[in-house]
Amino acid sequence: MPTAFSAHRSPLATQRSRLRTCSAVRLPACFPAASFLAWFAVLSLVAHPLCALDEGSLARVLEKHQEAGLVRYDRLIGDRDELDGYVASLRDANPGAMELPERIAFWINAYNALVVRSILDAYPLSSTRDIQDFETRLDHSVAGDLLSLENLRNEKIRKEFKDPRISFSLCRGAVSAPKISATLFTASNLEEQLEKNVRDYLAGPWGVQVDVQARKVLIPPIFDWYATDFVAEGRKTRDPEPALRTFLLLHGPPKMKSYLELTSPYALEIRKDYDWRLNDVHTSQKVPFVWPWSSR
């Protein structure tokens, strides 16, 4: 069974697959050679699941309108054609035909783009909470299905792929949410991007903090909202805390680990200061920076 990070299919294997697809089509003996070549070219495009997906447009949007993980909505709203083009291309995409790493990358890119597009449709605003049914509207056409952002996040991503690191790459449009990546997710950079994003988030101002006086490690609400994602599949437990500690030891900032490895380790507690204001560069400038690991 392939894993999320198994080797990506080689171009040679892909080409052989396309040849098999083409060879299964019977053509009349009198079919002209030039027409055959044209027909083969069409089949080669159709056989590839990304043939209609306009990922180049999304890459350019991120390059132009993302800044330090936040979005310049005031500029993007007047330059949205490429974003709208990418979102329109999602309708006919075929992620089911993709290899697993490519499929994961597809859904992360699609989710983040749809969050930004949904905000843009209602801009200006101060928070996604100002948008009625922002999470639950069946407003997004992807791969032939009409989905909500909640469907995308919980069913298409979390439930299918079962990798808790992915949640640290999903931008929910809030200041405290994971930042939107400046780089498009691809099959080849997926593992590197997931690792980088989870480590950056946990080490950042909205990640892990330590309250030395209370002997507590304060962790972001992602660990509360998706607690079961961190428990190994098939393991039944009502207490996910050991799994959360294991994840933090693997991916958290090195300085934090000492507080979890003590003979009498610090308790875990969910942070209560999540900031739902919009992940706009102008909003971010008002947010005071809290240095990680400061005592309170």
Image (cartoon, grey):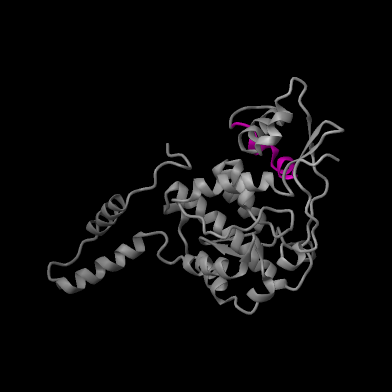
Residue 172 drawn above or below residue 53 = above
Instruction: State yes or no: residue 245 in magenta.
Output: no
Q: Is residue 42 above or below residue 181?
A: below
Picture coordinates of residue 98, whole percent (x, y): 42, 52
Residue span colored magenta = 220-232
Secondary structure character of the magenta stretch overall: helix
Residue at 69% over, 75% down:
74
| Quadrant in which the C terminus is drawn | top right
Q: Residue furthest top?
A: 263
Camera-nearest residue between 249 and 239: 249
Q: Position of residue 217 (x, y in %)?
A: 77, 35
Residue sitting at the far left: 30
- Position of residue 209 relative to residue 80, above or below, is above
Depth check: give the residue in front, 37 or 79.
79
**Direction bottom: furthest residue:** 78
What quarter of the picture does the N terminus occupy? top left
Q: Quadrant of residue 130?
A: bottom right
Q: Position of residue 250 (x, y in %)?
A: 61, 34
Residue 132 visible here: no
Of 266 and 100, which appears nearest the observer? 266
Q: Residue at x 41, y 59 (%)?
A: 49
Q: Quadrant of residue 44 in the image? A: bottom left
Residue 292 visible? The answer is: yes
Count of picture labels: 0
Estimate the x, y position of residue 247 in percent, counting from the top left. Answer: 64, 34
Residue at 29% in and 49% down = 13
Residue 223 highlighted magenta (yes or no)? yes
